[in-house]
Amino acid sequence: MNIIIQHSSMIPIYEQIIEQFKGQIVKRSLRENDPLPSVRSLAKELNVSALTVKKAYDALEESGLIVTVHGKGSFVAPFNLELEKEARQKEIESELESAIKKAKHYGISNGDLQELFNLLLEG
């Protein structure tokens, strides 16, 4: 499995695992019904606790990206276009929110900000 953990990162290991699996699913490197490594085998491969991997798998399952079949393992869930669209929109909203806060911090007016946004949209 192509998961790389950066132990020096401030991002918790389970979140690194989640984000990398999400990326592979979105990019279609992992496709519907592809099996994921068992919790124990991935933990051993990454040299992390099985509880850390389990926490990541639980979060991925809760978000609808994987399904776990008792006794058989975890698999990539059927691709949900609506769920993916919502996730991307949420990410963009977060980035726009950050940009608006920065603009307000620098004293840029709403009108100037809208003008800048429209200019960027055009091109």
Image (cartoon, rainbow, N blue to C red):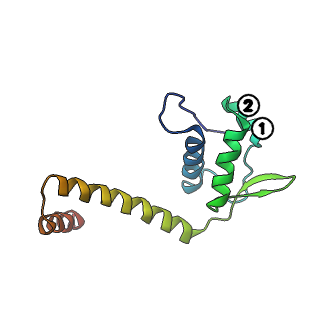
In the rendering, at what x and y percent does residue 23 appear?
54, 50
In the rendering, at what x and y percent does residue 85 appear?
49, 67
Q: Quadrant of residue 112?
A: bottom left
Q: The disc labelled 1 sits on which kind of residue?
A: Arg
Q: Quadrant of residue 62?
A: bottom right
In the rendering, at what x and y percent does residue 39 appear?
75, 42
Local crowd at mark 2 within 10 Å, few (<14), some, or many (≥20)?
few
Residue drawn at the location 53% of the way across and 31% of the way down: 6
Residue drawn at the location 31% of the way across and 60% of the way down: 96
Q: Nearer the viewer, residue 120 or 104?
A: 104
Please state, as top left, top right, bottom left or bottom right, where the C terminus lies in the image: bottom left
Q: Nearer the viewer, residue 23 or 31?
A: 23
Examine the rendered structure and indicate whether residue 25 appears above or below residue 3.
below
Residue drawn at the location 64% of the way across and 54% of the way down: 60
Which disc is residue 40 wearing?
1
Local crowd at mark 1 within 10 Å, few (<14), some, or many (≥20)?
some
Q: Secondary structure at mark 1?
A: helix
Reading the image, the residue beneath label 2 is 44
Q: Quadrant of residue 119?
A: bottom left
Q: Are discs 1 and 2 less than 8 Å apart at CB?
A: yes
C-alpha span from label 1 to label 2:
6 Å
Total numbered circles: 2
